[in-house]
Amino acid sequence: MTEKRLKTLIVDDSAVVRQVLTEILGSDPDIEVIGAVANPFLAVDRMAENAPDVIVLDIEMPRMDGLTFLKKIMTQHPIPVVICSSLAGPGEETTFRALELGAVDIITKPQVGTREFLAESKIRVCDAVKAAAKAKIGKIIPRERLVKHTADVILPAKKVALTKTTDRVVVIGASTGGTEALKELITNLPLDCPGVAIVQHMPEHFTASFARRLNDLSCVTVKEAENGDSMLRGQVLIAPGNKHMLLKLSGARYFVEIRDGPLVSRHRPSVDVLFRSSARYAGKNAVGVILTGMGDDGARGLLEMREAGARTIAQDEKTSVVFGMPNEAIKLDAAEFVLPLNQINQKVIRLCQD
């Protein structure tokens, strides 16, 4: 348990959502719910009494919408904000606008499901709040304990003979703060860049919207990955939320496999799964990049890539919103290069030309 519990304020007009979030967050010994209110006006009153460390914020609310409230928070007294959004629909675009305005993460509104589903939801929600608390702004012990899986549950570690090919591939992993970091990287890729595969920790359905947004801003093609998609020059594939993505090789063709499975390193999709498969099937033909994010997902996988001959990069502390995943990779000596975000793009291109 941390020395200081994270004071969290929930702002959502749904009484049911407020109750479920209060129960989920309150079950974590490191988090204290200091209030659950129906609108931003009540939130302001509660914040005056007890300043929160993190705010969990709905977007669509009466009297004052979440975006307006978020702007006020970020311009007057910045506090880490996690957006609590519906699974899909027209609100997705508004949610991404919130990330651009300074919100640090997205969680989906709690849904009724199986015990395992609820236990996984608890992990995601509590981890999002903890990551937000560490974010730069302008140990979970769940009652339903889940095993922390490694990439072994999806792809057992072993060496295989690689088919000869000179094609390069780029694999990238990111979490908290990654949406804006990826926007900077992807929108500056040249049209003839090697195929890129990305795992960004993001809820189901939102990855498709995220891919469309990047596609509209980029000269490369960006899409949510589908099972069997080839890794093509000038194309970026983003792992679908709630599915693992693996890099595979057939003859001289790289493609991706989309697969179900348990959470790996507390996530699905998992960066470790993508990186391990890249180590196995691409080896020295791959460039791996680990970006901002909480926890250690991707660190061991990046080490496996480096040991297989891949070139590897970690984002530096100064430009990371949360220096968790990159730092864990650096500590394992998995990163050949540690670079600020604005230098990673060109380094990747140069490494692919070697």
Image (cartoon, rainbow, N blue to C red):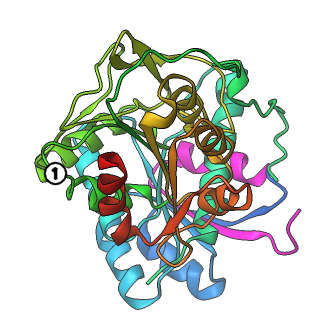
The type of residue carrying mark 1 is Pro
Q: Is residue 328 visible?
A: yes
Q: Find numbered disc 1 in the image and state the secondary structure of the residue it sits on.
A: loop
The magenta segment: 1-27
Q: Position of residue 132 (x, y in %)?
A: 58, 65
The reply to whether the magenta stretch includes residue 13 is yes
Q: Position of residue 277 (x, y in %)?
A: 55, 26
Residue at x-position 32% and y-position 60%: 345
Residue at x-position 42% and y-position 80%: 73
Residue at x-position 20% and y-position 47%: 213
Q: Position of residue 195 (x, y in %)?
A: 28, 35
Up-down relation of residue 72 to residue 261 (above or below) = below
Q: Image quadrant of residue 16? A: top right
Which residue is disc 1 drawn over?
190
Q: Residues within 10 Å of mark 1 (few under 14, many from 20)?
A: some
Residue at x-position 36% and y-position 19%: 255
Up-down relation of residue 332 to residue 123 (above or below) = below
Q: Is residue 60 visible?
A: no
The reply to whether the magenta stretch includes residue 280 is no
